Amino acid sequence: MGGILGVDYRSRAGFPVINIPGCPAHPDWITETLYLLSQKKLALDALDYANRPAHFFNNLAHHRGKYLWVPAFGNPGLFFVSPSGQI
């Protein structure tokens, strides 16, 4: 994960690639990331496991939904069959 160069890639100066996914990436995510970099306010620990700015990508809308877990396939829901449901 982490884009074409991978999360372990570092430039000759030792900097990681910061990944901003999307097709296209949201312009606010790009401009805010560039702004934070220009002001030296984006620390390496502010990146998630895929070198994305964590404040944009740690909380997805799907993580807050009441239908995240469903009891069985065919029930209304988004992602996963619950641990107590079918395997």
Image (cartoon, rainbow, N blue to C red):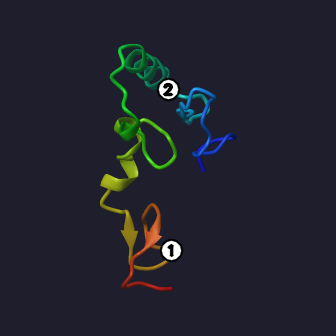
In x, y percent, where is residue 78?
A: 45, 61
Q: Are marks 1 and 2 in contact (CB under 8 Å)?
A: no
On the picture, is 61 further left or further right than 10?
left
Between 25 and 52, the one nearer to me in the picture:
52
Between 74 and 35, the one nearer to me in the picture:
35
In x, y percent, where is residue 69?
A: 38, 69
Q: Looking at numbered disc 2 in the image, what kind of residue is underneath it?
A: His
Decide: few, some or many residues near mark 1? Use Cα within 10 Å; few <14, some 14-19, many ≥20: few
Q: At 47% from the left edge and 38% from the top edge, which residue is drawn? A: 52
Find the distance from the CA under tag 1 to the CA under tag 2. 33 Å
Q: Is residue 53 visible?
A: yes
In x, y percent, where is residue 26?
A: 50, 26
Q: Which residue is mark 1?
A: 74
Between 10 and 69, the one nearer to me in the picture:
10
Q: Secondary structure at mark 2?
A: loop
Q: Looking at numbered disc 1 in the image, what kind of residue is underneath it?
A: Gly
Decide: few, some or many residues near mark 2? Use Cα within 10 Å; few <14, some 14-19, many ≥20: few
Q: Which residue is mark 2?
A: 26
Above or below: residue 14 compared with residue 87: above
